[in-house]
Image (spheres, coloured by chain):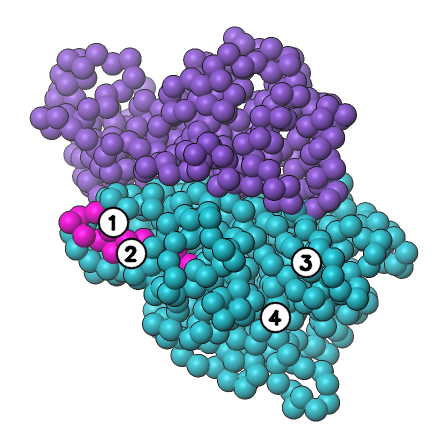
Chain colours: A purple, B cyan
Amino acid sequence: MNLLWLQAGGCGGCTLSLLGADARDLLRQLEDVGIRVLFHPALSEASGPEALAILEDAASGKVPVDILCVEGAVLRGPNGSGRFHILAGTGIPMLDWVQRLAGQARHVFAIGSCTAFGGVPAAGENSTDACGLQFEGDEKGGVLGVDWRSAAGLPVVNVAGCPTHPGWVVDSLMALALGQLGNNDLDALQRPRFYSDQLVHHGCPRNEFYEFKASAHKPSELGCLMENLGCKGTQAHADCNTRVWNGVGSCLRGGYPCISCTEPGFEEPGHPFMETPKVAGIPIGLPSDMPKAWFVALAALSKSATPKRVRENAAADHPVVMPAIRKTGLK
Amino acid sequence: MSKLVLGPFNRVEGDLEVSLEVSDGAVHSARVNAPLYRGFEPMLLGKAPLDALAIVPRICGICSVAQSAAAASALAEAMGLTSPPNGRLARNLIQAGENLADHLTHFYLFFMPDFARAAYAAKPWFAETEGRFKAQTGRATAEMLPARAGFMRLQGYLAGKWPHTMALQPGGTTRAVLAAEKIRLYAVLREFRAWLESTLFGDALETVAVLDSADALRAWAAGRQADFPRFLALADDLGLQQVGRAGNLFLSVGAYPGSVGSLFPAGVWDGAKGRRAELDTARIVEDLSHAWLAGDAPQAPAQGQTRPLLEKEDAYTWCKAPRYGGQVAEVGALARQLVAGQPLAQDLVRDQSPKSGGKSAGGNVTARIVARMLEIAALIPAMENWVQQLAPGEPFCAHGERPDAAVGVGLTEAARGSLGHWLTVKNGAIAGYQIIAPTTWNFSPRDAAGTPGPLEQALVGLPIPKDEAAPVLVQHVVRSFDPCMVCTVH
């Protein structure tokens, strides 16, 4: 399978993230399942006219493109011209290149949240008219339109995340190559379910603080970041805290809130990123699938039952009260 | 006069187009175009000041931490915060981690594969070079990526993830290191050092860091079986020390603050005079004359604006043209080392002609690569030292109120050079945000006086063989700057 990778109006961070994959040899791992990188802006030798020849052959159908990966939002402005992003050396907007190549590709992958939904380039007034391949925020449509399907019959596969996790990219590609990525393997936002059927909350090392609503108030404190510091881990779909990043990390493990970067519209939360919006002291964004009345009742109960250790450690940047050592054998 | 347009220029970060006017088989003039505009500066206006920490890292996937650090510094000034020592050390480690990884990515993935091109097939060193550095198939890539990924665990421990962390805050960092992580961090660094010493340098880092002249470097490299010495042999054979000379003014805003001073100091190095001067940021302005942006007079960044204007005569890029006291300046690892007085870096830019009196003839391909390698050799020992200084149990982050009305400037060094953020807060919201990134300096267009930017100067005079559609020498020069185009325009 030929893989062709384009960088549109993004930051290149998903490629850089991918290079941190925990494979002994990333390119051989892809080759092993039959994926050959025909062109990638950061990896290919071809540059200038050589690169253009590859892109033109792919866009004209002369060379088959089995997988088209697009990284970055597509900039439609100004006035629908796409001129905020001209593909260097061509004088032609990336908007046009993406449409041509998507028309040829057997499969199209949106690498990262800006390619999937618009993401950070669409923040603020979205002066560049940035959008995703098949979504504009959570509205279906985007550059390719609601009904678009690739030659193989799949919609755009949204490998969302900002950046996306290297494992999400590699495993999505491997799943496809192994015949394990069909319509039923994508969620309602067209994300691969192997990572999007989970919540960032799952496996969060701050879970004990969450249980007791023992909350951090300031950055670097150990407590739960949901109540005050804007954390959306109980609502955001991703396996960040079970898969972990760079071998050992995650946003929560790093001490800062989940900003739900795998979700459409995360770039404009409607409140400061590191502050939790509340009504009458209760966070607006309650955990997914949790009835509000029960959440409020349980929160009140668990706060009153918080052990001293959990309460004091929540407000410190390192444990100040250690777990008790039991005198008898553990049961 | 014929014209050659080179794009998409691969193996650079982001979008780059280089247009050359060729006469008599050589480059007569060059124009550099950054053809992507995303509008991060206007995007930030009206947002809560601390939201910059979520937005600006996403300007760039390869300088993400540097962008974050510059924003955190600008906010720190606006909020009157000073980081406790732990926060400073952790931030240095996170930044050095990014910069080192970027140097490595540049060397192995972006720069060296050009020496494995068919254009060099007749060279005696070709077979070995192709086996090691050929894009996608070279053995060196397969060895480097796992070593880099292992080193990136440092970011996992200290920053949660890379890129796009929010661990860097105005008052320090969000992740207080405990005793267990302090040991793991040291282990990660030692493991990475061992790989560098065996594969990249073929010698102890400390030995490399004290090489003090081009002759000493050549003697050290001779016959050494490692990747940096392999580059030096190629560079000597191809005369790359004579290629890609830009101006003679080098600028650094300083990097890795200690309790007193910085590991790499701020300053301006005038190669023609062989003299270093203090950096005066008031002398930095951005010229818009050749950018698709509204505005005529050069702007001081604190007052600068970014408003797209596509229909503009003479404009050929989205990149502004920063100038220092009206002059073109080069930034990057070479500039940092020249400003720091590193003797090998200074020797490598010296004019070799007998009449020159040993003055600088400007940066060149070899010097830019060597400077990055020197930084790798110097930074790992510094990082080991910083890890040992971390004091678990002591604070990592100072706290303050979010500002209602304030200004702040954040200056830091990304892998590719000097990065500045100029922030204005009014009524509790961002009222002004201007960014000057490293490649904005290096790949700037002409200014109102018609003076070309550093790369535009460095390309003039390069031979253009008729049989090369994308002349490889041009590619060496362009990539020697390690451009980051997504930062350039932002």
Q: Is residue B260 above or below residue A119?
A: below
Chain letter of the residue beneath label 1 in the structure image: B
Q: Which residue is mark 2?
A: B423
Do the dots labelled 1 and 3 sit on one chain?
A: yes
On whether disc 4 and disc 2 are found on a single subunit, the reply is: yes
Q: Dot 3 corresponds to which residue?
A: B20
Q: Nearer the viewer, residue B27 or B101?
A: B27
Q: Are marks 2 and 1 in contact (CB under 8 Å)?
A: yes
Q: Label 1 belongs to which residue?
A: B430
Q: Amino acid at mark 3?
A: Leu
Classed neighbour count for the residue bearing mark 1: other residues with Cα under 10 Å, few (<14), some (14–19), many (≥20): many
Magenta residues, start to end: B421-436
Q: Which residue is mark 4?
A: B246
Q: Secondary structure at mark 3?
A: strand
| N-terminal label among 2 and 3 | 3
The answer to which of marks 1 and 4 sits earlier in the sequence is: 4
Q: What is the distance, in whole Å, between disc 1 and disc 3 at their CAs? A: 40 Å
Disc 2 residue type (three-letter): Leu
Q: Where's the N terminus of chain B, which quadrant? A: bottom right
Tell me: A57 left or right of B30: right
Q: Could you tell which of marks 4 and 3 lies nearer the N-terminus? A: 3
A17 in relation to B93, above or below = above
Measure the C-alpha gap from mark 4 to mark 3. 16 Å
User: Which residue is rendered at x = 71% and y = 26% of the image?
Assistant: A60
Instruction: Please determine if labels 2 and 1 lie on a single subunit.
Output: yes
Q: Main secondary structure of the magenta part?
A: strand
Q: Label 4's element?
A: loop
**Do the residues under discs 4 and 3 have CB atoms within 8 angstroms?**
no
